Amino acid sequence: MQDYQRYPLGDFLLQSGGVLQQGELAYTTYGTLNAAADNAILIPGYYTGTHRSYRSLIAPGRALDPTHYFIVLTNLFGNGLSSSPSHAGPQQGADFPTISIADNVNAQARLADVLGVQCFALVSGWSMGAMQAWQWAVSYPQRVKALLPICGTARCWPLNFVFLEGVKAALHADPLFAAGRYRTAPLAGLAAFGRNYAGWAYSAEFFRDALYRNLGFASLQALLLAWEQDHQQWDANDLLAMLATWQSGAIDFTALCQISASTLVMPGSSDSYFTEQEARLEFEQLRCERARWQPLQSPYGHCAGAPDRFVQETAQIEAAIRQLLA
């Protein structure tokens, strides 16, 4: 049984000037929009995540309580549920257009109109979800009351960009990839993509202290094999479509100065590519008196902010959500 809906966008004009033909945005909701329409929360999806990734966080008594809030979960273009290269259609495979962070947000704004949401009480997300949250606060300032970006910056900074070029090159090096026009899944390239990515996802402390054992991995090689196998489940062009979206993040400092939402910036203290230092540079541009700096303290690198993955980190995130909604 399908646990989400697809909102038809028609031929959707992109920031690049191109068109996403017969576009669809996959989403799901929890709870009910109240009469005042002021209890909506938006959580955009992240790289290799779907709306299902946040499901365990949504429950009565938790910060994302569906008995109090109308919670909207959206899926990135390219993630296999929203319009993606892997879908049959006029822009399948390597012909799929480049879609920006702003394109995703503009599609979500159209969905919000249909759902009857004029202003979100909170827009939050982890990683690429945080990038979309930042974009919401810039593109639709009157529609975002509070902002919580977790382990994600407003732009794709140079180190982040180069990291992504590395994993992309690993996939392109597989001859079966055939410039995106593969007939057989490029499994070697996908495995190399995953193995390359693993070293960036966690911190030096995580590897040095063998914290992967806390995740059920008996050895470093077991962790690396799991990353290989996980990425082999993905369509290669889908991964690259989302990666191109990630690299498109380019909010400048001038735009950050204009953000009016109550903002709590939560970078990962040991994040290797959405770095705390660069998140701080962005935070310092905020002029809103209600802007707060509260790094997520964790040895788990970028993965610290993954929804409901680590108990202590999740407690920090839920406390931040409660602060902003109070």
Image: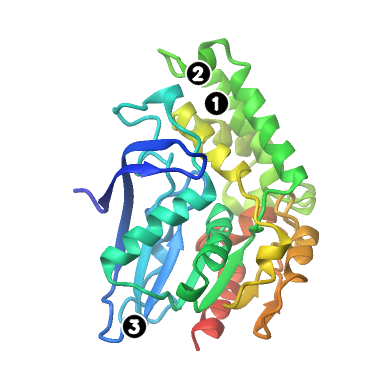
Q: Is 270 located above or below residue 82 in the figure? A: below
* Within-10-Å neighbours for mark 2: few <14, some 14–19, many 20+: many
Return the residue found at the far front.
17
Q: Residues within 10 Å of mark 3 (few under 14, many from 20)?
A: some
* Amino acid on which the number 1 mark rests in the picture: Leu
Residue 120 horizontal/vertical position (percent): 42, 74
Mark 3 belongs to which amino acid?
His
Reading the image, the residue beneath label 2 is: 186
- Mark 1 or mark 3, which is nearer the start of the sequence? 3
Separation of residues labelled 1 and 2 (CA atoms): 6 Å
Residue that appears at 55% across and 42% down: 245
> Which is nearer the N-term, disc 2 or disc 3?
3
Q: Tag 3's secondary structure?
A: loop
Mark 1, residue position: 190
| Colouring chosen for the image of the structure | rainbow
Closer to the camera in the image, 31 or 195: 31
- Tell me if label 1 and label 2 are in contact, CB under 8 Å: yes
In which quarter of the view is residue 175 placed? top right
Q: What amino acid is labelled 2 in the image?
A: Pro
> Is the C-beta separation of discs 2 and 3 under 8 Å?
no
Q: On screen, 6 above or below 96?
A: below
Helix, strand or loop status at disc 1: helix
Give the SS element for disc 2.
loop
Q: Do residues under tags 3 and 1 come within 8 Å of each other at their CB atoms?
A: no
Whole-angstrom CA distance, mark 2 to mark 3, is 46 Å
Residue extending furthest toward the left: 1
Up/down of 189 relative to 241, above or below? above
Residue 67, by quadrant, is bottom left
Q: Which mark is residue 68?
A: 3
Instruction: State the CA–CA distance, disc 3 to disc 1.
Output: 42 Å
* Residue drawn at 55 percent across, 60 percent down: 135
Tell me where residue 228 appears, x and y as whole percent. 56, 31
